[in-house]
Image (spheres, rainbow, N blue to C red):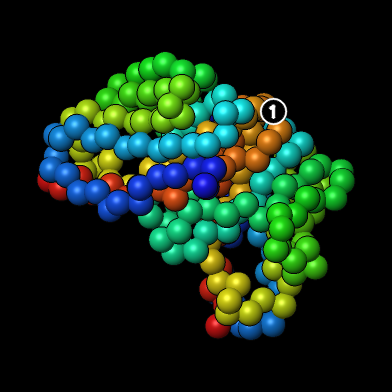
Amino acid sequence: GAVVSQHPSWVICKSGTSVKIECRSLDFQATTMFWYRQFPKQSLMLMATSNEGSKATYEQGVEKDKFLINHASLTLSTLTVTSAHPEDSSFYICSAPPVSGQPQHFGDGTRLSIL
Amino acid sequence: QKEVEQDPGPLSVPEGAIVSLNCTYSNSAFQYFMWYRQYSRKGPELLMYTYSSGNKEDGRFTAQVDKSSKYISLFIRDSQPSDSATYLCAPHPGGSEKLVFGKGTKLTVNP
């Protein structure tokens, strides 16, 4: 089945650091990928839609200068949390549909802890 | 009214029980209905995927959609401790529209 891989799975860093998270589609090409954030005991909240070769589309209330998204190839999207602070600590998850309009497949998530 | 309503539980059942998980939705444009299972500290895993009204069965799992009442259900027969997870419903209109998730129901199956 379709596989989406995320890296790293867990990162701990100091406040003020920028952190890059990678999302790869391993056995299919993805023109669109999605980035979610999930706080403890809450559902997934869509942050942005990553579009290959063009700018990402951000959801209302998500700071585009804070959460930089790059979708440079059909198999890789990256999310960079710039100047991270403790309130950015969360579980970040990416997804992609193997075929447009088909169900999204999710990566295993990245646990980000900012000290 | 929220687009998708799901009772967050938690729901605790003994092993072997039949589990019923439910969601309601408000957008009549939804045509596809997904159920995802999420284990602790993992990404959601696609469990069931149905189109329009009707039933779909896959092993111990049955997904049911009633578009007239905007009600979707997931039944788990002979529940196992390994079914302990959070179950998320996600109706979708199709195309490139974003997914809308329910809050998720946390299920614990006790041995």
- When asked about the image quadrant of residue A24, the answer is top right
| Nearer to me, B36 or B95 | B95
As drawn, is A110 to the left or to the right of B81?
A: right
- When asked about the image quadrant of residue A85, the answer is bottom right
Report the residue at 80% width, 68% height from top: A65
Q: Residues within 10 Å of mark 1 (few under 14, many from 20)?
A: few
Residue B54, image x, y percentages: 42, 16
Check disc 1 and report its element: helix, strand or loop. Answer: loop
Report the residue at 45% width, 58% height from top: A42
Q: Which residue type carries mark 1?
A: Gly
Image quarter where the C terminus of chain A lies is bottom right
As drawn, is B100 to the left or to the right of A81?
A: left
Report the residue at 15% width, 48% height from top: B110
Report the residue at 69% width, 43% height from top: A33
Q: Which residue is mark 1?
A: B95
Relative vertical location of residue A82 with respect to residue A115 in this rendering, above or below: above
Relative vertical location of residue A87 with respect to residue B12 in this rendering, above or below: below
Residue A95 visible somewhere in the drawing:
yes
Chain at tag 1: B
Residue B84, image x, y percentages: 28, 46
Residue B1, image x, y percentages: 52, 47
Number of on-image labels: 1
Residue A26 visible somewhere in the drawing:
no
Residue A67, image x, y percentages: 73, 64
As drawn, is A8 to the left or to the right of A56?
A: left
